[in-house]
Image: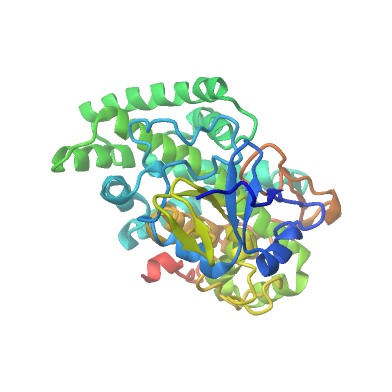
């Protein structure tokens, strides 16, 4: 199938100076006039940009026609090569039974109702400890680095079994993995220390198991019909750590900024904290998945009425899809009672975010606690002065200066039963 006569546009990139909570303005026009169109991406990849909700959902839900093998954000990362052979344990680029083997192995640590119930007290303790430290300051902080990143770092480290003092290993690796400028050599240099540490930890846990994720993953692997190699186990843990802290920290920071910029919605949440779980879904719909994710057609097919050739790449514009008025009435309005049912912010289909339930848990407990303990939390600078990331595929604020009058002690109001996260309901 030839594309020589097909016009190629530049991929519209996030414009936080114009749309701090939404996709670049071009996406609304493309969704209406050219919902499947050819684009040139920053890494040189040429792909079909898919912007309508129905089409994006269709592609995400059909791994048989649209493969994850190239890599999720290969269109934006300088070190990514869609034709690179799979590394051991690189399950995010796998499909079918090969992928499910890894997902089923990780699932018990991050997604079951029983595990989420066990994790909630740990997450609550991490958040309360961080707020206790901030209470000792001069009533100002930078929310992203002083609260969100430490909280999500400690949480994912606790889930896997990596002490907080080793956080630099996976924070550096995560920054490199999601960078738009790190080359392959830089990526290898950033990830190698983490892999080395995890390999040593793996040997220690084999000799002396602990009550942590890596020990349980070893035990499940040893009992499995097809055990995992040490390299596969190391890679799984590295992916969990690298992908599990900044994505959630950014959503938490971006979500708080959205609430502070929409005081009527924040007031609604303060008046009724039981809305927090559905507010999380609306916030994720509102700005989740901004850079889009990549798929590759496995055969000649069609999407949105457009012929797609086998081997063609597609960029699925999730944020544009979640702003599609055909799927969400008045989609550009933040409405915490909407619930966000059906949004694609955590993906859809076989490859939907494997850590989405732990992310929901962390976000829910964080917002519940902030509402209770820091009711006077507010922006310390005008909205237009909040800087956004420019060197990462994880789109959101690079810093969020905040202020408050008082941080209440954890015991105040703590007797109120917390609302369950959506994952706990299931």
Which x, y percent locates residue 117? 37, 60
How many marks overall?
A: 0
Res 38 seen here:
yes
20 to the left or right of 341? right
Q: Quadrant of the C terminus?
A: bottom left
Which residue is nearer to you in this view: 5 or 244?
5
Q: Please tell me which residue is depicted at 66% across the width and 75% down the height of the picture.
A: 335
Which residue is nearer to you in this view: 277 or 295?
295
Which x, y percent locates residue 416? 51, 71
Q: Please tell me which residue is depicted at 47% across the width and 51% down the height of the picture.
A: 309
299 to the left or right of 324? left
Q: Please tell me which residue is depicted at 45% across the width and 43% down the height of the picture.
A: 156
- Image quarter of residue 236: top left
Res 412 seen here:
no
**Display colour scheme:** rainbow
- Image quarter of residue 212: top left
225 to the left or right of 331? left
Q: Please tell me which residue is depicted at 61% across the width and 34% down the height of the picture.
A: 179
Q: Examine the rendered structure and indicate whether residue 138 appears above or below residue 278.
A: above
Which residue is nearer to you in this view: 31 or 243?
31
Which x, y percent locates residue 369? 58, 61
Which x, y percent locates residue 402? 76, 51
Q: Examine the rendered structure and indicate whether residue 276 appears above or below residue 354.
A: below
Q: Examine the rendered structure and indicate whether residue 170 appears above or below residue 314.
A: above
């Amino acid at each position: 199938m030839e594309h020589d006569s097909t016009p190629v546009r530049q991929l519209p990139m996030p414009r936080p100076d114009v749309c701090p909570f939404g996709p670049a303005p071009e996406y609304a026009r493309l969704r209406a006039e050219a919902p499947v169109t050819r684009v040139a991406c920053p890494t040189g990849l040429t792909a079909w940009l898919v912007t309508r909700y129905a089409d994006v959902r269709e592609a995400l839900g059909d791994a048989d026609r649209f493969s994850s093998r190239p890599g999720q954000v290969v269109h934006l990362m300088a070190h990514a090569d869609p034709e690179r052979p799979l590394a051991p344990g690189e399950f995010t680029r796998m499909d079918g039974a090969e992928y499910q083997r890894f997902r089923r192995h990780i699932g018990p640590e991050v997604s079951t109702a029983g595990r989420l119930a066990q994790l909630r007290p740990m997450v609550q303790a991490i958040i309360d400890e961080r707020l206790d430290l901030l209470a000792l300051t001069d009533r100002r902080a930078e929310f992203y680095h002083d609260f969100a990143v430490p909280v999500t770092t400690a949480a994912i480290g606790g889930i896997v079994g990596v002490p907080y003092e080793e956080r630099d290993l996976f924070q550096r690796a995560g920054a490199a993995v999601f960078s738009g400028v790190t080359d392959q050599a830089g990526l290898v240099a950033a990830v190698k220390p983490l892999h080395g540490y995890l390999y040593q930890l793996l040997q220690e846990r084999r000799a002396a198991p602990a009550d942590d994720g890596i020990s349980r993953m070893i035990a499940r692997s040893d009992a499995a019909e097809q055990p995992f190699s040490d390299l596969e186990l190391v890679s799984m843990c590295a992916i969990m750590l690298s992908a599990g802290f900044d994505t959630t920290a950014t959503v938490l920071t971006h979500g708080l900024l959205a609430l502070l910029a929409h005081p009527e919605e924040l007031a609604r949440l303060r008046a009724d904290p039981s809305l927090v779980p559905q507010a999380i879904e609306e916030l994720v719909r509102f700005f989740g998945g901004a850079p889009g994710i990549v798929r590759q057609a496995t055969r000649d097919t069609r999407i949105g009425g457009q012929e797609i050739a086998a081997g063609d790449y597609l960029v699925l514009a999730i944020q544009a899809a979640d702003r599609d008025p055909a799927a969400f009435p008045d989609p550009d309005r933040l409405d915490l009672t909407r619930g966000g049912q059906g949004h694609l912010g955590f993906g859809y289909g076989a490859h939907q975010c494997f850590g989405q339930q732990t992310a929901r848990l962390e976000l829910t407990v964080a917002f519940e606690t902030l509402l209770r303990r820091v009711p006077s939390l507010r922006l310390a600078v005008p909205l237009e002065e909040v800087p956004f990331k420019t060197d990462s595929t994880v789109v959101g604020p690079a810093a969020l200066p905040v202020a408050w009058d008082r941080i209440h002690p954890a015991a105040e109001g703590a007797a109120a039963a917390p609302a369950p996260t959506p994952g706990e309901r299931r």
